[in-house]
Image: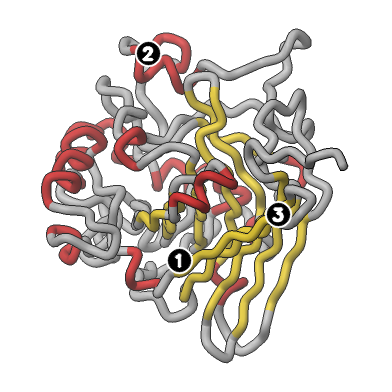
Amino acid sequence: MKISTVTLALILKASTATNSFVAATAIAKGGDQTPLAQEGQDGHNKEKVQESIDKLGFNIYGDSSIFDPSSSIEVDDNCQYTATVRLQLADADVPFPPVLLGPDDPGSCSLNVTDCNGQSCLNEVRNVYSFSEEFEKVTGFNHVGVDWSPCGHPPFQWFARPHWNLHIFRVTPEERLNARCPGGMLNPFIYKDPPFEQPTPEGRAFYVWGKDTNDTIANIPDTFEDGIDAVPGEAVHTFDHDAAAPVADWFDPQLIMGLYDGKIRFWEPMFPHVFVFGPTANSYEDTGITYVSQTIQELPSEYSLLYEPSDGFTTLILKGHAKGCEIENE
């Protein structure tokens, strides 16, 4: 599906009314967030939810219990870990746009259309699932944002279709609340100030990336390209543009990583809903992942994503070198 410039113009038509849009979505960005006002699966109380809304304009915590989540961690004698995360995504109660984005018509994917539980279908539905202390100790990952994009997001030529974003964060949800630009948003995806003219330290941190002496961003694959667009509560996204399929052909997961304040903020498999829905089992495996000037030894060296239609569960398996683990010489 080719996304025309006409469609992009229609999608972002309301960008000049940013302040009113942000205010309108401040209650809960991205879908029906009614259960989130109560303490949920991860113990997210009203105060945390309100702080998220106050700082970011939306609720990052959500209610991950709707996915019946579970996780486990194992480490072998060679310091290699196997981390497993299971989520019921196929039958999750998340909003879908009644009319999908078309070549020349945004359908329900417009800021002015509130077809997704009273919100724009361009807004993401965010949910936090926290890992155990042992899981974090071994992998460096604190929690996963099980985040749903009803219409997809930019770049539209690749990702403009309903999909899941498994943002696996190396920081706490509370730390994520500081990743923001108080100056406001140009549209739901991009901060309004030029990237390198952010007026606050929090905003400038989006464009501070850890580089080696060759001026190359460290701890990401060498095929990844610099990012520009900054997403509040997350980071600047970087990925392999050449590996991204045209949106009409997108099926396999795409690996994304987040950059913020000189650090790797998250590690994210992103995949369309069709991969984890329907009567056919699907699987994907990416092995031999390497990173430029790697200093974070626990970053995954391989991962797999498995969908089992008999129970609707999706299983993410990460493998890598356990954090701080050294093999003792005999």
> Does residue 194 sit above or below 6 in this rendering?
above
Identify the residue position indicated by label 1 in the image: 100
Q: On residue 319, which mark appears? A: 3
- 10 Å neighbourhood of mark 3: few (<14), some, or many (≥20)? many
Residue at 57 percent of width and 84 percent of height:
278
**Residue shown at the point (24%, 45%) measured from the top left:** 58
| Disc sitting over residue 218 in the figure | none
In the rendering, which numbered label is found on residue 198?
2
What type is the residue that disc 3 sits on?
Answer: Lys
Question: Looking at numbered disc 1 in the image, what kind of residue is underneath it?
Answer: Leu
For the N terminus, the image quarter is: bottom right
Image coordinates for residue 217, horizontal then vertical, percent? 68, 21
Residue at image coords 56%, 31% = 264
User: Badges 1 and 2: C-beta atoms under 8 Å apart?
Assistant: no
Q: At which x and y percent is residue 178?
A: 31, 28
Which element is circle 1 on?
loop
Indicate which disc, 1 or 2, sits on the residue closer to the N terminus.
1
